[in-house]
Image: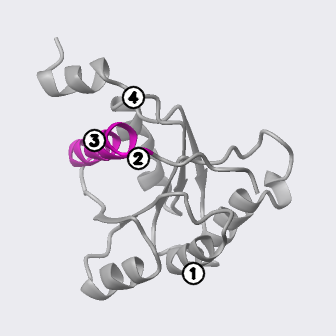
Amino acid sequence: MADSSSKILSANHVRSGVILLADDDPDDVDMMRRALAKNQLADELYTVGDGEELLDYLLRRGKFEPPGVAPMPALILLDLNMPKMDGREALREIKLDPRLTSIPVVVMTTSTAQQDVARAYELGTNSFISKPITLSELVEVTRTLGLYWFQTVRLPEVARP
């Protein structure tokens, strides 16, 4: 039998749509995939490994150009420390592009540095979360994310670039 908190999420479950995870650590990606599945949050989870690939996905460039390969996300989960283009640079580009700026971006990173928190908000992040270390902690964080982003607030419809 499920506990009451999971019953509440299941009973009121609103499909979240596409979540785009930008993270270069395969273990973190796997843990996030499992946490989101446990909470039944992502209708579809897409992953990219760096900021350049994130922008290619969002702007339908390169391997993401064919229709249907890269559906527009309802929410972006963004790591800050990635190769090629880090999360800070990608966040700046997303929030400067009028076609992308309305997509909520939640920074999820191992950093707890106040300068990273402040800079992420200056660049336009919607939330900043330090990554939990254990799967059980991540399951709780993603449950809270789901309750807030997919049940409490109303997200804008995002047009394809």
Position of residue 143 measured from the top left corner of the image (x, y, whole percent): 28, 40
Question: What whole-number distance in Å separates the C-alpha atoms at marks 1 and 4?
Answer: 31 Å
The disc placed on residue 89 is: 1
Which is in the foreground here, disc 2 or disc 1? 1
- In this figure, which residue is indicated by the disc labeled 2? 32
* Mark 4 neighbour density, 10 Å: few (under 14) some (14–19) many (20 or more): some
Check disc 4 and report its element: helix, strand or loop.
Answer: loop
Measure how far apart labels 3 and 4 are at the Cα level. 11 Å
Magenta region: 135-154
Task: Mark 4 or mark 2: name the one nearer the start of the chain.
Answer: 2
Q: Is residue 15 above or below residue 78?
A: above
- The image shows residue 140 at horizontal and vertical percentages of 22, 43
Q: Quadrant of the C terminus?
A: bottom right
Structural crowding at the residue carrying mark 2, measured as other residues with C-alpha within 10 Å and reported as few (<14), some (14–19) or many (≥20): many
Residue situated in front as seen by the camera: 33 or 87: 87
- Please tell me which of labels 2 and 1 falls first in the chain: 2
Q: Identify the residue under disc 3.
A: 139
